[in-house]
Image: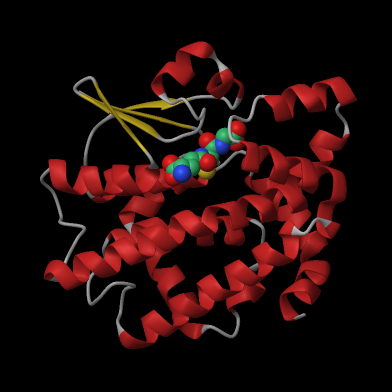
């Protein structure tokens, strides 16, 4: 039996869902709320209180990149590591890159779209929210973003990190059709949710001068896996992200070009 805990709108949850869709696997999907991630029951499955959590025949598998690799190794279906050891190494390089870029995409999402909700909280509610984040580095980042918004030191770092990510993608896609070679692989699965969030924020200007990324993104969106994960069950926070992103874009563009 295969189960996945995720929430609609979670970048890492989408990563795992895309991989399961690419492998054409049936599974029990548990779409949970953010509040559920803070319960004792969920933290027994995933002590960091995050998604995704994959459970296969009672065994718990954590960390989205580890889940991607496991799903590819454990099941039949189209192989998602291609091109022998070199192709696998390249796919892992991108999976590592996706993990490194997750805090940057979180900073963009929370600064641009989620922050107003936190500013409405009472000081007690806000402290309880921050106290419920297990890792101290994540608590510090969340607090700085809520208190300082675009002036937090995390925002320019995220802008630089995401620009570099897209430049690296442009460079790879100038050499090969897909990120890790001639065929679709876990590299593409891992990077798609990060670009999906930029797409939700309507920050398409970030790839207007990166034709390789623009073309790759259209090909990703045309895949059945994208339709299965996003067309049928769109992110309920998508309209909020788009509205906030459209308003923020002039300011974000300035930071990106600084
Ligand atoms: N390194 C972890 C990160 C997981 C993570 O941070 N997940 C986010 C969603 S992308 C989450 O569950 N956040 C909890 C929240 O928003 O309350 C992984 O790749 O699985």
Q: Is residue 183 above or below residue 102?
A: below
**Which x, y percent locates residue 136?**
64, 37
Q: Furthest residue to the top?
A: 41
Quarter where residue 237 is shown: top right
**Which x, y percent locates residue 114?**
74, 43
| Near-viewer residue (81 or 177) | 81
- Is residue 175 found left or right of 13 in the rendered image? left
Residue at (26% x, 51% y) in the render: 22
Position of the C terminus by quadrant:
bottom right
| Near-viewer residue (103 or 25) | 103
Q: Is residue 115 above or below residue 107?
A: above
- Is residue 222 found left or right of 49 in the rendered image? left
Residue at (46% x, 12% y) in the render: 41
Position of the N terminus by quadrant:
top left
**Which x, y percent locates residue 131?**
70, 25
Residue at (72% x, 75% y) in the render: 256
Please say whether residue 122 is visible from this viewpoint.
no
Residue at (14% x, 68% y) in the render: 85
Q: Furthest residue to the front?
A: 136
Quarter where residue 151 is shown: bottom right
**Which x, y percent locates residue 162?**
59, 67
């Amino acid at each position: 039996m295969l189960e996945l805990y995720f929430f609609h709108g979670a970048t890492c949850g989408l990563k795992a869902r895309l991989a399961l869709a690419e492998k054409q696997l049936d599974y029990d999907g548990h779409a949970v709320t953010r509040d559920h991630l803070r319960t004792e029951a969920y933290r027994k499955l995933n002590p960091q209180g995050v998604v995704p959590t994959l459970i296969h025949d009672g065994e718990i598998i954590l960390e989205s990149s580890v889940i991607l690799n496991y799903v590819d190794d454990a099941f039949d279906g189209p192989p998602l590591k291609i091109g022998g050891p070199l192709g696998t190494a390249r796919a892992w390089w991108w999976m590592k890159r996706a993990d490194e870029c997750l805090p940057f995409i979180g900073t963009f999402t929370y600064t641009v779209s989620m922050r107003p909700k936190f500013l409405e909280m009472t000081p007690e509610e806000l402290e309880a929210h921050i106290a419920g984040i297990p890792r101290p580095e994540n608590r510090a980042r969340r607090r700085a973003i809520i208190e300082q918004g675009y002036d937090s030191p995390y925002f320019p770092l995220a802008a630089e990190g995401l620009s570099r990510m897209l430049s690296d993608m442009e460079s790879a896609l100038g050499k090969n059709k897909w990120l890790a070679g001639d065929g679709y692989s876990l590299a593409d699965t891992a990077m798609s949710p990060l670009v999906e969030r930029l797409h939700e924020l309507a920050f398409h200007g970030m790839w207007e001068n990166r034709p390789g990324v623009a073309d790759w993104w259209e090909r990703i969106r045309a895949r059945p896996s994208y339709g299965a994960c996003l067309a049928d069950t769109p992110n309920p926070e998508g309209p909020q992200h788009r509205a906030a992103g459209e308003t923020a874009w002039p300011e974000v563009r300035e930071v990106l070009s600084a």
